[in-house]
Each structure stands twice: as C-alpha cells, then as structure tokens.
Image (cartoon, rainbow, N blue to C red):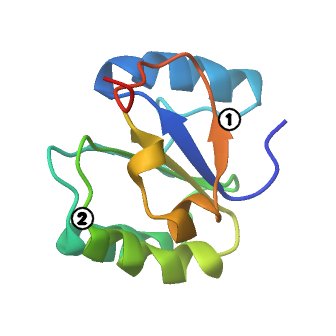
Amino acid sequence: MLAGNTYLVRGGEATLPELYRYLAAEGITVEGNSDAYVRVYQHFGIDEARELSARANGRALGACARIFIAVFPIITGEAQNALLKTLEEPPSGALFFLMTAAPATLLPTLRSRAQMIDIGGPDESIV
C-alpha cells in the first residue's frame, strides 16, 4: 500500500509498464488519466525540475490524485536540490514517482524524502 507522496523506482523507460501495473494494483490509473504527467528525459536538469514543480502546483483536472512520473538516466545535483522544496512540502493530492536505474546515486537528502518501490528494474549502480 502506498503511503506518502514521493517514491523512487529502480528502472528506466522499459520498466514503465511494470510501474503502471503496480500502480493499477494500488488503485491508481495512469494511462488515460488527465491528471497523470509522465515524462521520459535523457537528462533531467534544473529547467526540468522547475517545470515539474510548477506543474505539481497546478490544479487537478479530475477528482483523483495528480500523478507525476519522471524517468531519467541522469539527474543533476542542481535539479535534485530544486525538487527538494516541492518534495518537502508537496502540493495536496500530488504523488511523485522518480524512476532511475541507480537510485543509490541520488543525493541522500532526496532519497530520505522518498520511499523505494522495487518492481524488479535493473540496478545499474552495481556494475
């Protein structure tokens, strides 16, 4: 059962269908949900972090929670720090899923605000 608002998911773009199935089992529909924002980035920098935070502070279109899924192989330290404010004081009804192949490489302060979801994605931090 999901408790909280921020989750780290080990994996990448190929793991998205597994995350969708996991969320569906939790009663959260992503596909076809107007309040789901899913983006796959090649590089997640400060501009992407600011955009995600701005979208999170917007209004929901439906009655359900707003879902934000960001998939990235690389995230800058600046971007992680920019996300911290949003993750520390999340907008009401917003759920964040940050998907990366190596969650252990994220800043400890970011990891401390998130719960880990293990859906069996590859762990590239041990290569």
Query: Residue 65's spot in the image, x, y percent?
Result: 67, 55
Would residue 15 be seen by someone viewing this image from the given angle? Answer: yes
Quarter of the picture containing the N terminus is top right
Q: Along the line of sight, which residue is nearer the eye, 4 or 105?
A: 105
Task: Provide the secondary structure element on which disc 1 rests.
Answer: loop
Q: Residue furthest left?
A: 42
Which residue appears at 59% of the width and 20% of the height? 119
Q: Amino acid at mark 2?
A: Thr
Which residue appears at 27% of the width and 57% of the height? 75
With respect to residue 26, does 70 lie above or below? below
Q: Is residue 65 left or right of residue 49?
A: right
Locate residue 99: give its quadrant. top left
Which residue appears at 60% of the width and 17% of the height? 21
Query: Can you tell which mark lies on residue 76?
Result: 2
Q: Which residue is mark 1?
A: 28
Q: Is residue 59 left or right of residue 53?
A: right
With respect to residue 89, does 80 lie above or below? above
